[in-house]
Amino acid sequence: MATLDVSAADLTTLSNAMKESGNAIGGQIDPVRKNLWGMGTHNGQRESGKNYPKQGEDANAALERVAFWLTHWSTAVKATGSALGQSADAYVYTDAVNAKKVNELS
């Protein structure tokens, strides 16, 4: 019969990598929100698109959706990473408790 072995160290490594990835994704939210397509405000900001206000509004709406999506993606990846880290901790704890019980029987 095959046994199932879980490497807590590998699970922790994966957890940390996922949380790091979630932070990297989250780091792209502000650059998206702060670089919306302009509609010709003529105040030194957002000069592009001054002759195309409807298209500029559509582009801005699309960028806002991208930022919204990035927010949820980042949150989900970090939450998954946290859950994996908690699982690694639970495996280590459970293994230690079971090992103690086995040792007490010997």
Image: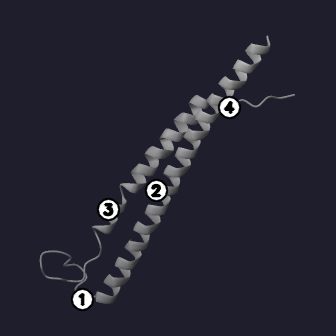
Q: Residues within 10 Å of mark 1 (few under 14, many from 20)?
A: few
Q: Residue at x 53, y 40 (%)?
A: 15
**Amino acid on which the number 3 mark rests in the picture:** Asp
Which residue appears at 79% of the width and 14% of the height?
105
The Cα atoms of the two marked residues, 1 and 3, are separated by: 26 Å
Amino acid carrying label 2: it is Ser
Number of numbered tags placed on the structure image: 4
The residue indicated by pointer 1 is 51
Marks 1 and 2, how far apart in space?
35 Å
Q: Is residue 29 above or below residue 78?
A: below
Q: Amino acid at mark 4?
A: Val
Work out whether mark 1 precedes mark 4 in sequence or the reverse, and give the earlier one.
4
Q: Is residue 20 left or right of residue 2?
A: left
Q: Which residue is mark 2?
A: 74
C-beta proximity under 8 Å, tags 1 and 4? no
Residue tagged 4: 6
